[in-house]
Amino acid sequence: PNRQMADAYADRSYGSDPVGFGQTLGIIVVDFQKAFTRPGGALAGSPHIEAAVEATQRLLTHARAAGVRVAVSYVAYATLDAMPHWKVRAVKTDLFRGMPGTELDPRITAGGQSDFVFENCAAAPFYPPSRLFTAMHHV
């Protein structure tokens, strides 16, 4: 089954052109903000998210100590009109700039400054600011 899936993507030209690599390692942390991670957060409560935050906290402690570049993203909107179409009501009520749910989880920011912080990134790895981070730091 895995080979069939790989062939299906290759047949559609996925992976046909090399992308290359940067000169250094970097980490982009996506959406670990209080709405998703803290008790009472509108979208919180999943043990999977809690486990991911704890593992990421450990990873970032070691990465920052080793000088690895770290970028973090969170979702926050200025207005309802600035928001893409969402099917999740809590996004439409709890993720506006300045609201508690848009604050980064302190476990992610503890122990070091992030090199780059950007907002409004539901698809952060593909969002222009993350591309800027990777280009600026040769990640």
Image (cartoon, grey):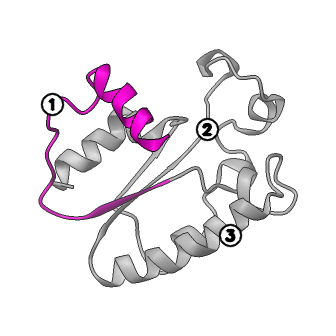
Q: Quadrant of residue 39?
A: bottom right
Element at label 3? helix
Left or right: 112 in relation to 131: right
Query: How many residues crowd around disc 3 within 10 Å: few (fewer than 14), some, or many (20 or more)?
Result: few
Q: Quadrant of residue 85?
A: top right
Indicate the position of residue 3 as horizontal and vertical percent values: 39, 40
Q: Looking at the image, which is closer to me, 46 or 128?
A: 46
Q: Name the residue beneath numbered marker 1.
A: 17
Which numbered dot is residue 51?
A: 3
Residue at the image position 78 percent from the left and 29 percent from the top: 88
Residue range of the region highlighted in magenta in the rendering: 1-29
Q: Amino acid at mark 3?
A: Ala
Indicate the position of residue 6 as horizontal and vertical percent values: 37, 36
Indicate the position of residue 70 as horizontal and vertical percent values: 36, 63
Q: Name the residue beneath numbered marker 2.
A: 76
Image height of 95 relative to 81, above or below: below
